[in-house]
Amino acid sequence: MTAIAEPVNTRVRPGAAQMARWAISDSLVMTRRNLLVWLRVPAYIVFTVVQPVIFVLLFRYVFGGAIQAPGSGGYVSYLMPGIIAQTAAFATFATAIALAQEATKGVIDRFRAMPMARSAVLAGRLIADSIRMLIVILVIIGVGYAVGFRFQNGVVGAIGMILLAEAFGIAVCSVSAFVGLAIKDEESVQAFGLIWIFPLTFVSSAFVPIATMPSWLQVFAKNQPVTLVIDAMRSMALGGPAFPLNPALWESIVWLAGVLIVFVPLAVRSYRRVG
Amino acid sequence: MTLTNTDFAIEVAALHKSFGEVHALRGIDFAVPRGSVLGMLGPNGAGKTTAVRVLTTLLRPDSGRVIIEGYDVVRDAAAVRRRIGLAGQSTAIQLELTGRENLEIMGRLNHMPRSSVRGRAAELLERFDIADAADRPAKTYSGGMQRRLDLAASLVAEPSVLFLDEPTTGLDPYGRLGMWDIIRELVGRGTTLLLTTQYLDEADELANTIVVVDHGRVIASGTPNQLKDQVGGDLLEFTVPDRSRLDDAVTAVAGLSDSTPTVETETRRVKVAVGNRGSTALVEAVRRLDASGVVTENLALHRPSLDDVFLAVTGHATEAPPEIGSKAHKTPTAGVPS
């Protein structure tokens, strides 16, 4: 059996402060890179921006007339928080697909064989995707205002709604990141995304009042996290139980925290095992 | 046998790696002297990529050790990563970004100062003949250009050890030759290189030492010439049109080497093994045949290709290891006479 003598080189490890600086700068480089890619490809922009705008117009003018919405401001006010949450969830398709592509093309291998921070690929992805999501949310709100939507609960409520939508999007992103890195096949990732994101967003209070659904479906729709998030967003945008008292808000925060606690480590684990 | 780590950029000892029931690596040993090229040759599924992934810190070995530039790939992975470059089988560049952006991002992620990143990217773009297209998205590049950009991306931080996993797979012949030139230039600059390939001529062309890998084991190793010698070295062949002169021809070339010429009477073909002194023997043969007045046709020197080597060793791989397979427990180094 061949043996190798102890290496003569002594280990020189950078300090914790240096590691932290690198973690931040590497994440920012990855963020910038991911945003640059998004801006370079018209198809991505169409998918992420134009599609939700079409949804706003479709539900506002085509389906909206047939839907009786509770509360003030008519259907468009009911609709907008739902569309925004759905958009945030749909945006994570891109997260999963991009990571799956990077895993199969050997991009992640190359990154992992470099001295860059281990956290930067996922962190850069999540940061870039939440920036992208924020841009899209602001565009949708702009379109919403053009077709009659108004925030009715002041600036704080509006900001609160946007922040909750972002938190929701990041939580779904962590699930998508895990799915993308675990499945690693672009088409399967896309198909899998449809399987869980579509029912969760459509069988919720996003587009129609849950009371209009058959009772067996109501049980799911009422209690699933997307409904809780959308109800909380709606109350912040349109008024309703005040901030600290709204149970939907607290329940959705617990849900989102739970999703992040489970799926961020899972995503990190599958990142380490890519290949 | 104990290795010292002063002269070797890569040392691999008793490396094992399994994925469940699949034993991808079953005890691999080799060492690569600084500044030399090791060609890892083997068919698909031989374990080449797994070996590269362990050597580049991407996979933890089950057992065995790998030392890169004096650092253990498991214990000192971070130190190893600062010294290596990796270009995998597929182009791992971001096609939506320009060549320059791709390289600058690599520089930043390697923690190079912003000021030197720019210059380094420009230098590599120039050297790899991408300068004209530097500011176009990489997806507009030809396959060969994308491959060159990919290689450049692995070189931004000036690694002292470079791993190329099948660097020319999928390239057209022209692209392959271009890649070979680039690889030779890199080696000329002192980079230690480990390249895997399925192409025998590629290993022959570029490598100082070759390890032939099959079923997770090194089944043969040595310099390209040593491997060729193992299948008998160069072979001189010619035809004698006049059957009555066959014996004279055999007498004329008999002294060329230690081995006795063989004659196929039916085809009037004479063959003589001449070891590794092929071209000298060829000249000598022409002189002797001419002196004895024998007319020959189709005089040729057949150099055994690595194909011959490969078939010779892998043909027995599933049974008892062939004689040259017994080299597996030794550590091949470039230029060691057999």
Image (cartoon, rainbow, N blue to C red):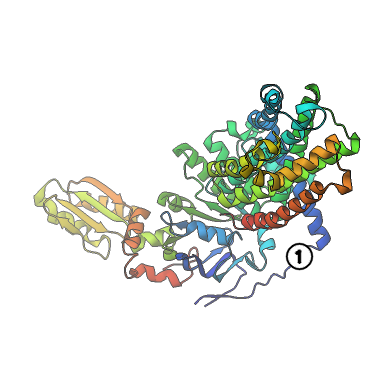
Residue A51 is left or right of residue A245, and the answer is left
The chain containing the residue under callout 1 comes to A
Which residue sits at x=71%, y=53%? A259
Answer whether residue B117 is visible to the viewer in this image. no
Q: In this view, does A136 lie above or below A108?
A: above
Q: Is residue B154 above or below residue A159?
A: below
Q: Is residue A172 above or below residue B333?
A: above
Q: In this view, does A248 lie above or below B227?
A: above
Q: Position of residue A173 (x, y in %)?
A: 69, 46
Answer whether residue A155 is visible to the viewer in this image. yes
Which residue sits at x=11%, y=47%? B242
Which residue sits at x=72%, y=43%? A227
Q: Position of residue B88 (x, y in %)?
A: 55, 50
Quarter of image, res B63:
bottom right
Is A71 or A15 nearer to us in this picture? A71
> In the picture, which quadrant includes the C terminus of chain A?
bottom right
Q: Element under label 1?
A: loop
Q: Badge 1: few (under 14), some or many (20 or more) residues near its Cα, within 10 Å?
A: few
> Mark 1 = which residue?
A13
Residue A150 is left or right of residue B149, and the answer is right
Which residue sits at x=46%, y=72%? B330
Is B282 or A189 nearer to us in this picture? A189
Residue extending farthest left: B244
Quarter of image, res A268:
bottom right
Is B117 or A52 nearer to us in this picture? A52
Q: Where is residue A121 in the image (x, y as percent from the top left)?
A: 69, 49
